[in-house]
Image (cartoon, rainbow, N blue to C red):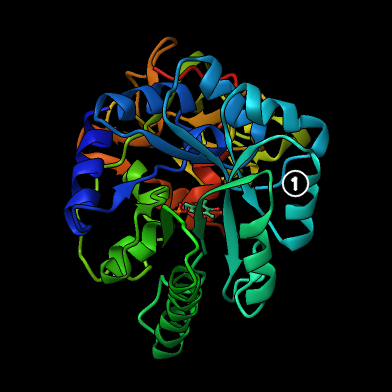
């Protein structure tokens, strides 16, 4: 929680005073636990949040989270009553969807998505007439509009050029509508890399996700600001049992591990259902026990994982193994897990399983 607060302060310091953080709490706050994270942020004075879908938004509201909660994705018309019940803000994902929202016939709070090049969601920025029509829809209360930058994490001139074009297209539309008298209280376009690499593009909100959790998507990503971030999460499991294997005995599914020497094997109470990637099996990954590395051996199971603790003779049942985080002088980062499994930290963190207790 302390790390989370420090990350909030670090990101705020990059932004102008009138740009507020709108933390991304989607996917259980990138695996960290949406509710405890939201509560901590609320205590820091943050009062606007974004999530991916209505179930995430409703869960936050039901548990006492106040302020604005923006749903970044699609909500099915059957669930429109919940938008009003929980006072949620819905993204207009395109012009056709604006019509669907308006046909509901009761006032709905929305932010209009503007597509400036990612081509995922949002009405195309070129379609000014459609966007104008959305503003004129009787039942839509336009609280904001936003776009999403999709190539802002490199130093590459082509990406830089593209990002600046996205921002220009977005601000052009908003400027034109403003001159015509349309009122759009909040506009926003930055996520993590927009804040770090393009602080000058700040709007009214910055939708901070991964950086808030103290890490970038990849340690090779560009961060112009050189911001020091503090990882919020450690992932730990208990050793449930330790046993001796004779040389040449095998272990685990498919007998994928064979002991080359008399071996002490520890079982950990964590598996791929908890988000430990199965790709870390058979020596690819390791864990920290009492500050020392123990290689993962054999195939990671759904609920359990075997590690070789022959060189950690003091390891015993009940001890803590660190999957992500520090132990003694050593540390395993989410970067390491992501690199070894061919993905980004966002995926490693957001897939930490539901049954893992968030302490
Ligand atoms: C996930 C998401 C964010 C947060 O992205 P980060 O790169 O993790 O900061 C912001 N905006 C939208 C639309 C998103 O989908």
* Quarter the N terminus occupies: top left
Q: Is residue 53 left or right of residue 335?
A: right
Q: In the figure, residue 2 lies in which quadrant? A: top left
Residue drawn at 31 percent across, 63 percent down: 202
Residue count near mark 1 (Cα–Cα under 10 Å), binned few <14, some 14–19, many ≥20? some
In the image as oriented, which residue stretches furthest toward the top? 318
Q: Position of residue 270 (x, y in %)?
A: 56, 24
Where is 86 relative to 296, above or below? Answer: above
Residue 272 in the figure: left or right of residue 348: right
Measuring from the top left, give residue 253's x and y in whole percent.
75, 32
9 with respect to 356 (left or right): left
Q: Which residue is mark 1?
A: 102
Instruction: Please state which of residues 197 and 249 is positioned toward the viewer in this rendering.
Output: 197
SS at mark 1 in the image: helix
Instruction: Name the side, left or right, on which 303 lies relative to 344.
Output: right
Q: Nearer the viewer, residue 326 or 223?
A: 223
Please tell me whether residue 273 is drawn above or below residue 231 in the rendered image: above
Q: In the image shown, does 73 or 175 lie closer to the viewer? A: 175
Q: Is mark 1 within 8 Å of ligand 1?
A: no
Quadrant position of residue 53: top right
Let me know if residue 118 appears in the view. yes
Q: Is residue 305 visible?
A: no
Give the answer, above or below, for where 52 lies relative to 132.
above
Q: Residue at x 56, y 28 (%)?
A: 87
- Say how many tags the image has: 1
Going 65% across and 53% down the picture, which residue do you hit? 92
- Give x and y (percent) for residue 59: 58, 21
Residue drawn 79% across the image and 38% down it: 104
- Is the C terminus in the top left, top right, bottom left or bottom right quadrant? top left
Q: Position of residue 320 (x, y in %)?
A: 38, 19
């Amino acid at each position: 929680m302390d790390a989370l607060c420090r990350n909030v302060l670090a990101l705020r310091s990059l932004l102008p005073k009138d740009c507020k953080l709108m933390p991304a709490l989607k996917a259980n706050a990138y695996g960290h636990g949406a509710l405890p994270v939201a509560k901590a942020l609320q205590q820091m004075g943050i009062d606007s949040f974004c999530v991916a879908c209505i179930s995430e938004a409703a869960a936050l509201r039901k548990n006492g989270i106040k302020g604005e909660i923006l749903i970044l994705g699609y909500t099915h018309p059957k669930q429109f009553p919940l938008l009003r019940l929980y006072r949620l803000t819905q993204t207009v994902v395109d012009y056709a969807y604006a019509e669907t929202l308006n046909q509901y016939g009761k006032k709905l709070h929305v932010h209009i998505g503007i597509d400036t090049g990612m081509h995922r969601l949002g009405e195309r920025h070129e379609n000014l007439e459609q966007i104008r029509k959305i503003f004129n829809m009787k039942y839509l209360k336009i609280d904001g509009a936003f776009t999403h930058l999709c190539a802002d994490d490199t130093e590459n001139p082509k990406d830089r050029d593209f990002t600046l074009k996205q921002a220009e297209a977005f601000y052009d539309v908003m400027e034109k509508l403003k001159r015509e008298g349309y009122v759009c209280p909040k506009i926003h376009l930055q996520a993590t890399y927009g804040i770090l690499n393009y602080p000058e593009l700040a709007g009214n909100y910055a939708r901070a996700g991964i950086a808030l959790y103290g890490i970038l998507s990849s340690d090779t990503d560009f961060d112009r600001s050189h911001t020091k971030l503090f990882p919020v999460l450690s992932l730990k499991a208990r050793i449930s049992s330790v046993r001796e294997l004779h040389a040449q005995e095998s272990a685990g599914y498919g007998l994928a591990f064979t002991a080359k020497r008399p071996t002490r094997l520890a079982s950990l109470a964590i598996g791929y259902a908890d988000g430990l990637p199965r790709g870390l099996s058979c020596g690819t990954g390791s864990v920290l026990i009492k500050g020392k590395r123990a290689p993962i051996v054999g195939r990671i199971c759904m609920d359990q994982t075997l590690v070789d603790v022959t060189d950690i003779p003091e390891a015993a049942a009940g001890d803590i193994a660190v999957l992500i985080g520090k132990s003694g002088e050593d540390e395993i980062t989410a970067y390491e897990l992501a690199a070894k499994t061919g993905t980004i930290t966002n995926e490693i963190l957001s897939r930490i399983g539901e049954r893992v207790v968030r302490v």
